[in-house]
Amino acid sequence: MSTQEKQKFLGDSLTKEKKDRFLILHNDDVHTFDYVIDALIDICQHDTLQAEQCTMIIHFKGKCSVKAGKYEKLKSMKQEFINLELDATID
């Protein structure tokens, strides 16, 4: 492997670490639409329409990416959802 190829490989590795992650909210068949909508507005700062759309996607598809960003920022948001007994993951 040439020096240039090694640099490209190392550059790709570093870029992957800095890429945005996704906060995923999962359907739980327990909470109401209004409960999830309010949580999305409070935690993710979604406007009402965006929160309603995400809630519908969660209901029909089983999950929805509700926020993109750096892991550290999403980690605290995930914990807020968990505190509200909503199932959230970071992908």
Image (cartoon, helix red, strand yellow):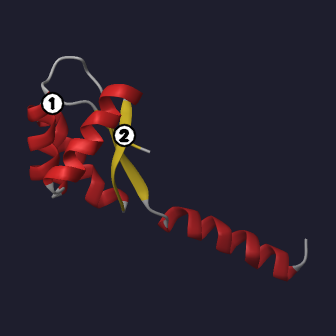
The local crowd at label 1, few if under 14, some if 14 to 19, many if 20 or more residues have their Cα within 10 Å, is some
Q: Is residue 25 above or below residue 28?
A: below
Residue depicted at 18% across the width and 39% down the height:
81
Residue 36 position by quadrant: top left
Residue 58: give its label: none
Say whether residue 26 is visible.
no
The residues bearing labels 2 and 1 have C-alpha atoms spaced at a distance of 14 Å
Say whether residue 56 is visible.
yes
Residue 37 position by quadrant: top left
Q: Are marks 2 and 1 in contact (CB under 8 Å)?
A: no
Q: Is residue 34 above or below residue 65?
A: above
Residue depicted at 16% across the width and 57% down the height:
47
Residue depicted at 44% across the width and 62% down the height:
20
Mark 2 — residue?
Answer: 64
Mark 1 — residue?
Answer: 33
- Considering the numbered disc 2 on the image, is that residue within a helix, a strand or a loop? strand
Task: Give the mark nearer the N terminus: 2 vs 1.
Answer: 1
Residue depicted at 8% across the width and 42% down the height:
38
The local crowd at label 2, few if under 14, some if 14 to 19, many if 20 or more residues have their Cα within 10 Å, is many
Name, please, the residue furthest toward the right: 1
2 or 1: mark nearer the eye: 1
On screen, residue 58 versus residue 2, left or right, reads: left
On screen, residue 7 versus residue 3, left or right, reads: left
- Considering the numbered disc 1 on the image, is that residue within a helix, a strand or a loop? helix
Q: Amino acid at mark 2?
A: Cys
Q: Amino acid at mark 1?
A: Phe
The one of 31 and 13 positioned closer to us in this rendering: 31
Q: Is residue 60 above or below residue 48?
A: above
